[in-house]
Image: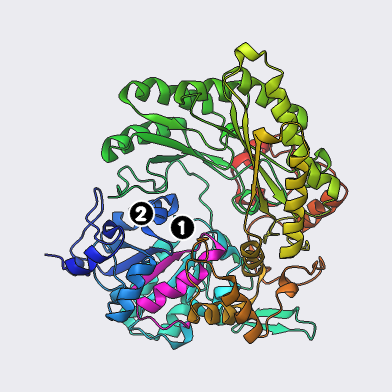
């Protein structure tokens, strides 16, 4: 019988105790005496957010299909339990067995967002695992990180033993087998890490050295040993139909952020938006077979009891069998009270027809993501969306009965002018005007437009990775220009405008673009109380500003400074398949306001064809 890590007394004191008790429907429990390797899979945020993450569900299913491995789940304890665990010296535990994380062989951490970095240190600290990898012994798990932020692992390099670059379905089996072999041979922990670093896609940061120039830029990044790879190439699954995908995902006890069945219909994106890291690093585009998706839809709904199914993709409209799949889902499940959710759709006649079948038009809002207010700026970022297309989509929606629209923009983009900034207000006003062109008797009340601005961070492996980033004051000044312009317009009462926290964005920029020297800032901030930095109510910018000052790390060096295209970047040792030459070409095209056609229209020679499949493969055949 499994023990309970937290007493009833503690569970009654904390918010949402169901976050910590495990035993959910479809969770997998094995006899720990019958497995050779125990893997703790961690999402460093609260349970509700972690339970919504598809990547962990896929890996959890994969690991647990292997008879010699038992994979369990771990999430960050919320502030109330964190305090109690420290006061009462309770080690962090996995949900399925309630055993201490320190007793596991591996601790795998999904690094989804830069603002979770202090939560990673919380997980290590509460697990009683030394924060620095150099201080660990075989009594500690191997700490391995993966996910989108692993594409610049350097700010976290000192805290991880290994990083996994790319998609997790490929070489984890080799890593687990190597671990078993090294334990049997009684080799040192350092020797295991060195051997693991030779597996494709695995990066062992302790096996590499960095040297810096006097101006702070990187002089040289190189392996300490000749037998270590100079470049780490991302791992990728080309056949995403015949690979791991859960049929019975774990069903949370409490409402998760996305409490639904998720069908990943494709990976990658053909669009080539120059600000979008996901659109670059997940290339090439690969589609799942529509019959496989129909089968999984049946099985996952049956095995979970969920009442909603969501199609997951960076750009769902580009999935070539979307019409067939959506119509199947509507016909099969609509009469059973199953909702179909369709994020990432371009708003056209097909999308509106589908949405009207699956949504209550009077209650739901439509989302457009123009990203920039002016056509010039949309050309710079390669959005491939004209004002004419936006207005046509909005007009079709209004005529079909919708009257609520969400608009997503970015501020602080490269080459941005005041006219581009005001364009956000002008486009919002133009869309509102389009609504009032409909005869009054045909309208559905007043139009409601919510325009939101996030602030731009130049991410690694995008054409904008060399760009300068705005300061906090510059970001806020631009947001106020938009806000004041909206207030001067005719339809100001129909338009609500809000914007992201500028100080959080600046910090995100440092963590996204930083090198190993940023690690000491993360540790300093964590030791002084920084935690749950992704949450507005717990983020404390003062702690971070003090940490940068005490560690003598210059924020502007990582954000404001435009980087030379010949400079060695902290992430240059990683090969994501998209070449640096392609990114340089796109950077120049952005500055010249030249639009690049999408992958299906014309191959741009980005380098992803080297993987031998997807859209690249189709285009050549």
Tell which circle, 2 or 1, labels the residue nearer the N-terminal end.
Answer: 2
The quarter of the picture where residue 352 lies is top right
Is 26 or 4 nearer to us in this picture?
Answer: 4
Q: Is residue 343 visible?
A: yes
Q: Is residue 59 above or below residue 306?
A: below
Q: Is residue 390 visible?
A: no
Instruction: Please give the range of residues in magenta.
Output: 105-132
Q: Is residue 420 above or below residue 459?
A: above
Quadrant where the C terminus is found in the figure: top right
Pointer 2 residue: 62
Label 1: few (<14), some or many (≥20) within 10 Å? many
Residue 372: % across, % down: 74, 43
Residue 512: % across, % down: 63, 66
What SS does tag 2 mark? Answer: helix
Is 278 or 442 nearer to us in this picture?
Answer: 442
- Estimate the spatial distance between the alpha carbons at disc 2 and disc 1, rounded to whole Å: 9 Å
Pointer 1 residue: 168
């Amino acid at each position: 019988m499994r023990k309970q890590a937290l007493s009833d007394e503690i569970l009654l004191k904390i918010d949402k105790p169901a976050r910590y008790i495990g035993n959910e429907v479809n969770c997998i429990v094995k006899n720990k005496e019958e497995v050779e390797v125990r893997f703790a899979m961690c999402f460093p945020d609260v349970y509700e957010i972690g339970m919504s993450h598809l990547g962990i569900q896929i890996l959890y299913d994969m690991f647990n299909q292997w008879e010699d491995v038992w994979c369990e789940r771990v999430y960050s304890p919320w502030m109330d339990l964190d305090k109690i665990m420290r006061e009462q010296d309770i080690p962090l535990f996995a949900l399925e067995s309630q055993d201490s994380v320190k007793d596991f062989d591996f601790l795998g951490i999904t690094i989804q967002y830069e603002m979770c970095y202090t939560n990673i240190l919380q997980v290590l600290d509460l697990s009683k695992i030394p924060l620095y990898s150099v201080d660990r012994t075989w009594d500690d798990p191997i700490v391995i990180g993966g996910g989108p932020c692993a594409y610049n692992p350097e700010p976290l390099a000192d805290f991880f033993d290994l990083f996994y670059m790319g998609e997790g379905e490929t070489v984890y089996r080799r890593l687990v087998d190597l671990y078993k072999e090294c334990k049997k041979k009684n080799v040192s922990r350092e020797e295991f890490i060195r051997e693991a670093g030779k597996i494709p896609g695995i990066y062992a940061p302790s096996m590499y050295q960095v040297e810096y120039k006097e101006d702070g830029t990187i002089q040289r990044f190189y392996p300490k040993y000749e037998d270590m790879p100079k470049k780490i190439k991302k791992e990728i699954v080309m056949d995403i139909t015949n690979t791991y995908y859960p049929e019975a995902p774990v069903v949370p006890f409490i409402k998760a952020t996305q409490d639904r069945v998720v069908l990943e219909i494709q990976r990658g994106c053909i669009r080539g938006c120059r600000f979008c890291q996901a659109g670059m690093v997940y290339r090439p585009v690969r589609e799942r077979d529509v019959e496989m998706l129909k089968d999984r839809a049946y099985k996952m709904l049956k095995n979970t009891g969920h009442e909603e199914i969501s199609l997951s993709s960076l750009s769902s409209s580009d999935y070539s069998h979307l019409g067939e799949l959506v119509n199947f889902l509507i016909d099969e499940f609509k009469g059973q009270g199953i909702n179909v959710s369709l994020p990432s759709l371009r708003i056209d006649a097909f999308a509106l027809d589908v949405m009207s079948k699956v949504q209550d038009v009077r209650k739901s809002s439509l989302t457009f993501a123009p990203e920039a207010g002016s056509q010039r700026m949309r050309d710079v970022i390669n959005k491939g969306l004209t004002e004419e297309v936006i207005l046509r989509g909005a007009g079709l929606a209004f005529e079909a009965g919708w009257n609520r629209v969400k608009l997503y923009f970015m501020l602080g983009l490269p080459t941005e002018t005041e006219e581009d900034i005001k364009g956000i207000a002008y486009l919002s006003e133009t869309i509102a005007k389009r609504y009032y062109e409909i005869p009054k008797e045909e309208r559905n009340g007043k139009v409601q437009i919510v325009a939101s601005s996030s602030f731009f961070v130049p991410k690694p492996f995008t054409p904008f990775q060399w760009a300068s980033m705005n300061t906090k004051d510059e970001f806020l000044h631009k947001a106020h220009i938009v806000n004041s312009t909206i207030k001067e317009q005719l339809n100001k009462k129909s338009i609500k405008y809000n914007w992201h926290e500028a100080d959080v964005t600046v910090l995100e920029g440092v963590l996204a673009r930083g090198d190993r020297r940023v690690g000491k800032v993360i540790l300093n901030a964590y030791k002084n109380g920084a935690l749950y930095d992704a949450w507005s109510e717990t983020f404390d910018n003062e702690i971070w500003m003090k940490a940068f000052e005490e560690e003598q790390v210059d924020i502007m060096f990582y954000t404001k400074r435009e980087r030379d295209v010949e400079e060695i970047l902290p992430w240059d040792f990683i090969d994501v398949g998209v070449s640096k030459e392609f990114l340089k070409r796109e950077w120049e095209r952005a500055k010249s306001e030249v639009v690049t056609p999408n992958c299906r229209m014309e191959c741009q020679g980005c380098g992803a064809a080297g993987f031998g499949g997807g859209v690249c493969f189709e285009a050549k055949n």
